[in-house]
Image: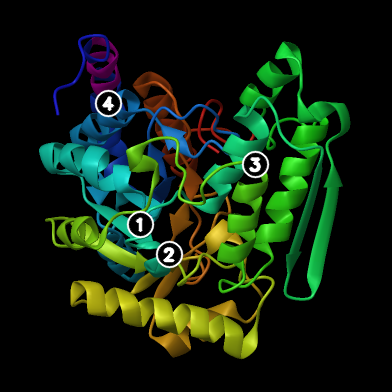
Amino acid sequence: MTMSMSVEPALRHAKLRAAQCWSRLRTTGRPRGVVLAYHRIAHPGTDPWNLAVSPENFAAHMAYLASTGCASTLDGFMGELRDHDRPARRIVVTFDDGYACNFHRALPVLNETGVPATLFTVSGAIGRPGAFWWDLLDRIFLEMPELPAVLHLKAENRSGFWSLGNDAAPGPQAMKANATWKPDLTAPSTPRQRICLSVWEFISGLNGTAQPDVVADLAAWAGLHPDTRSDDLSRPMTMDEFRKMSAAPGIEIGGHTATHCDLSRIQGEAAFEEIARDRQLLTEMTGRSPKRFAYPYGRMSPGAGHLLREAGYEAACCSRYGVASSDSDRFLVPRVQVIDCPVEAFAQDLQFLLGRLNGQVPQDQDARAPHLLR
């Protein structure tokens, strides 16, 4: 993948800054590092949850990571965390869910730069033609200019009723607000935004067998086919794509449940079935048993770690912001979600995070990187 000319000056500047500080950060203190979480490599119409990073920015991010010499596999990094006598500063790249764009857009960049990555995969989604349900939800409520005035959904022993009122056909100002809305930063300001959040909670709380029918009902209500997607690469990978990516050099596969279920809402046998079936399916698909796991939505019940151990996992990543160290709980390894940002901000934030661990930033300063990682 050839990097655009507009990216190269910023990347050169970031590499110069990296040369000034990374050798020092790599060789002092106990083993610590940052686990980065990506999802989509795309230019979506709406992205309320900041799941997408543009192909251009992603290419620059990976070229920068390669220049630091700190990029590591998750397996290698977890091994170093067990070796308290070997100081290290590592950066680990991970992807969640199994989007097709990971194969078509991310993998060529990873191959070119030599940066390894772990793909936490929803095994039950592989080969499915439609979009992930949360992307379909965003398209319906945040992009479509006209919807029916009333929505009624039923599933299991639950039902939901929502009235859009005048927001069934919002004006240009409301549509603009919907398209740029970020729930993590601002409270919902339109009926569609509030309903989008409410329906998201409704669907995410269902078990994996009930979700497809509800999503199909939602799509039909909006006048869409359930396999509708914003572009061809917003779908999950096909089986062939997934097998090719899993076999690529530097790629590790991890579990993410069979149906992307919320492990804080199901427990016991049902939760174990989601975890164990996912691991079994991934093993059958790739010929390798995954050792790491990532919690869907970053949510888990207090007993989730025990279930993961029982299923054969050795560690799990969560969505708690922070830096992983030898003190980290192996089943609550922190991760930092990457949002769409230019390479200079990306580099500055990584240097801030690892520099803070190295005692170079006052401890009373805000623990979060100052710009575009969260």
Residues under numbered marks 3 and 1 in contact, where contact means CB atoms less than 8 Å apart = no
- Distance Cα–Cα, label 1 vs label 4: 26 Å
**Quadrant location of residue 160?**
bottom right
Q: What kind of element bears circle 4? A: helix
**Which amino acid, mark 4?**
Ala
Residues under numbered marks 2 and 4 in contact, where contact means CB atoms less than 8 Å apart = no
**Residue 11 within the segment the image draws in magenta:** yes
Segment tinted magenta in the rendering:
9-15
Sequence order check, earlier mark of 3 and 2 = 3
Residue marked by disc 1: 31
Left or right of 247 on screen, residue 262: right
Residues under numbered marks 1 and 2 in contact, where contact means CB atoms less than 8 Å apart = yes
Left or right of 372 on screen, residue 195: right
Camera-side mark, 1 or 4:
4
Q: Which mark is residue 222?
A: 3
**Quadrant location of residue 365?**
top right
Residue located at (34% from left, 82% from top): 280
Taking depth in this image into account, of 304 and 357 the one nearest to the observer is 304
- For disc 3, the neighbor class at 10 Å (few under 14, some 14 to 19, many from 20) is some
